[in-house]
Image (cartoon, rainbow, N blue to C red):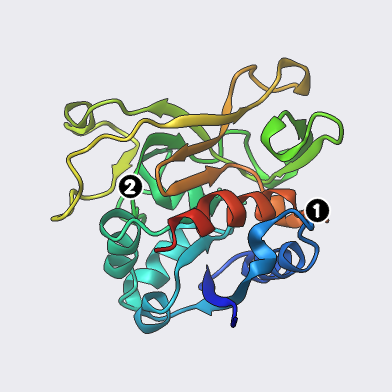
């Protein structure tokens, strides 16, 4: 029987999209024998146009510069289709670093007038929480669901955001706050409020604030502050394909 086809997109407007493509390819190639990834014909494609977006089953939004990505998306007519992809069609998406910022309903320390959000993830993230590029760091994260207990997952943080607040009801997302930009309300936004699950937080020993939230999942949306595509470890990509992408296919 021919394998069923799955098309996984990587938003390729700016930033670390090639690294994600390589990681997805490696995760597919190296997937464990027990994994269901081998039963599918998974294709990885770059997404730069609304037509390409319409052809994929899932999408990664890479790290880079969220202001540039949103500007390019707007100029190329991709911003509204991206909002619909995430919030109305509810396709599986994963935002890393700048990608997490774009998927957040709110962002603080954001560039007013220069920053559009896709939204969908009911959190407020804070941009550049750890400071400048020179304050980049790596640390081990506790993520038991990918087997990171025995073999720690090393996460790379580069001008990374954190999730500073989980938004629990729509009314708390109203009224202007200085420094905060918001994704617009969309026709077709679901009234149902799926809970945001905290997937990983920083530990005290890392020289950062204990408990800083660096990975979250809400329904079809997964977001990480760090860059899992910049180390050779493909476990998180494999987990995302297996646990978030394949189960969502009709
Ligand atoms: N600070 C960047 C932004 O606001 C994100 C950095 C990154 O993706 N490494 O978009």
Please name whichever residue, 243 or 231, is drawn nearer the observer in this view of the structure: 243
Crowd class of label 1 (few under 14; some 14 to 19; many from 20; radius 10 Å): few
Please name whichever residue, 106 or 71, is drawn nearer the observer in this view of the structure: 106
**Looking at the image, which residue is at 23% across and 27% down?**
169
On residue 208, the disc is none
Label 1 residue SS: loop
Q: For residue 31, which quarter of the picture?
A: bottom right
In the figure, 176 relative to 114: above or below? above
On residue 231, the disc is 1
In the figure, 195 relative to 182: above or below? above
Mark earlier in primary sequence (1, 2) = 2
Residue at the left extreme?
187
**Looking at the image, which residue is at 77% across and 36% down?**
147
* Residue that badge 2 annotates: 120
Q: Residue 156 in the image: x percent, y percent? A: 73, 44
Question: Is disc 1 in contact with disc 2, using a CB cutoff of under 8 Å?
Answer: no
Label 2 residue SS: loop
Crowd class of label 2 (few under 14; some 14 to 19; many from 20; radius 10 Å): many
Q: Is residue 192 left or right of residue 53?
A: left
Q: Residue 153 in the image: x percent, y percent? A: 78, 39
Q: Is residue 11 visible?
A: no
**Looking at the image, which residue is at 71% across and 66% down?**
28
Instruction: Report whether the residue tagged 1 is closer than 8 Å to ligand 1.
Output: no
In the figure, 35 relative to 110: above or below? below
Q: Specify the quadrant that holds the C terminus.
A: bottom left
Q: Residue 53 in the image: x percent, y percent? A: 40, 75
Q: Is residue 127 left or right of residue 103?
A: right
Please name whichever residue, 114 or 117, is drawn nearer the observer in this view of the structure: 117
Q: Specify the quadrant that holds the N terminus.
A: bottom right
Q: For residue 201, which quarter of the picture?
A: top right
Q: Is residue 212 visible?
A: yes
Q: Residue 241 in the image: x percent, y percent? A: 60, 57
């Amino acid at each position: 029987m021919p394998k069923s086809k799955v098309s996984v997109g990587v938003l390729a407007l700016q930033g670390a999209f090639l690294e994600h493509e390589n990681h997805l390819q490696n995760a597919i190639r190296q997937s464990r024998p027990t994994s269901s990834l081998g039963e599918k014909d998974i294709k990885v494609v770059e997404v730069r146009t609304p037509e390409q977006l319409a052809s994929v089953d899932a999408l990664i939004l890479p790290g880079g510069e969220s202001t540039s990505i949103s500007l390019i998306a707007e100029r190329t007519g991709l911003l509204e289709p991206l909002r619909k992809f995430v919030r109305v069609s509810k396709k599986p998406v994963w935002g890393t670093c700048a990608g997490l910022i774009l998927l957040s309903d709110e962002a603080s320390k954001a560039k007013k007038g220069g920053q559009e959000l896709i939204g969908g993830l009911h959190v407020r993230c804070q941009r550049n929480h750890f400071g400048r590029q020179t304050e980049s760091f790596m640390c081990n994260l506790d993520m038991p669901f990918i087997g990171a207990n025995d073999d720690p997952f090393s996460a790379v943080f580069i001008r990374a955001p954190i999730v500073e607040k989980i938004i629990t009801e729509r009314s708390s997302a109203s009224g202007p706050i200085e420094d905060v930009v918001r994704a617009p309300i969309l026709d077709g936004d679901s009234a149902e409020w799926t809970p945001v699950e905290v997937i990983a937080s920083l530990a005290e020993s890392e020289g950062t604030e204990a408990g800083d939230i660096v990975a979250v999942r809400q329904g079809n949306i997964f977001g990480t502050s760090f860059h899992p595509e910049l180390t050779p470890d493909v476990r998180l990509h494999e987990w995302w394909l297996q646990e978030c992408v394949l189960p969502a296919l009709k």
